Image (cartoon, rainbow, N blue to C red):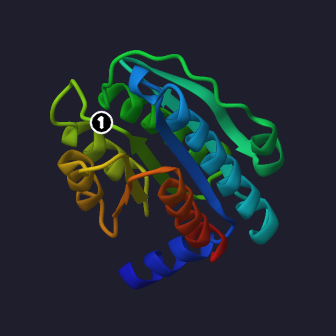
Amino acid sequence: MLALRDLNRSAVHCHGYHVVFCLDESGSMYGQEWEDLIQAFKYFVAMCASQGGGQDMISVVQFGGSARQTLILASLDKAQCFELKIAGGSTCFTPALNSARDLFQLGSQQAPGLVPMLVFMSDGGNNDGDVSSALSLICQEAVDLQCHTIFFGSGGSERLERMAEAVPGGKYHLSVDGVELKRAFEAIAADVTAL
C-alpha cells in the first residue's frame, strides 16, 4: 500500500513546480547586488518559460527585518512582467520562511499538482538565529519539498548550508558575484524544466 501511495503521489506531481523565492532585500543588497539579483531572477523565469511545460507557478517573498509577499502563485507569463523593488532593512530569515510556508499552503489548495520548491537567497547572516523550527514546519507540510539555498557573496554561509542540509536532497549554492548568481539560478531552472 505504501508503494502505491508513493506512486500515486508521483503521478499527481507531474504538472510542474510551485517555486517560492525568498529573496533578501536588506540594506546590504542595494546597488549592484540588487541589479544582479534582478537579472538572475529574470533569467530564471525566461528559461522556465522557454523550456518548461508552462505549468509552473512563481511566488516571491522579499525579506529584510520582516517579510512581504510580492508575487503570489503567478504564471510564468505574469512572472516575466514582475519587477523586483528593494525595501531595505535588517536581515531575519524566520519571517521569510513563515511567509513561504503560507504560500506553500495556498499552493497546495489552489494548485495541488505542483511540486513545492523553495529557493532561499541571502547575502549575509541573519539576526534571528536558528531557523530550523520554521523550516521543519515547511518540510512537514510541503510534501516532496525541494530546497535550494544561495549565499550571494564571498565566504559562504554556514546557516544557509545547514538549511539546505535540513531538507532531503536540499542543495546549497555559493555565488560570489552576479555571474555566479545567474549560474545558480540557471542550475535551479534546469531542475524545474527537466520535469
Residue for point 69% across, 66% down: 15
Q: Taking 48 as reference, is 30 left or right?
A: left
- Can residue 113 be seen in this snapshot? no
Regarding residue 192, the answer to whether it shows in the image is yes
Q: Is residue 127 left or right of residue 67?
A: left
Q: Residue sitting at 16 percent across and 36 percent down?
A: 130
Residue 47 percent coordinates (x, y): 72, 63
* Residue 151 in the image, given as x and y percentages of width and height: 35, 49
Q: Nearer the viewer, residue 84 or 107?
A: 84
Quarter of image, res 29: top left
Number of marks in the rendered image: 1
Give left or right: position of 191 versus 92: right
SS assignment at label 1 = loop
What quarter of the picture does the C terminus occupy? bottom right
Q: Which residue is more in the foreground, 132 or 162?
A: 162
Residue picked out by circle 1:
124
Establish if 63 lies above or below 154: above
Horizontal and vertical percent for residue 67? 45, 22
Q: Quadrant of residue 17?
A: bottom right
Image position of 161 with respect to 130: above or below: below
Density class for disc 1 (Cα within 10 Å; few <14, some 14-19, many ≥20) is many
Q: Amino acid at mark 1?
A: Gly
Name the spot of residue 69 as percent of width and height, x first.
56, 26
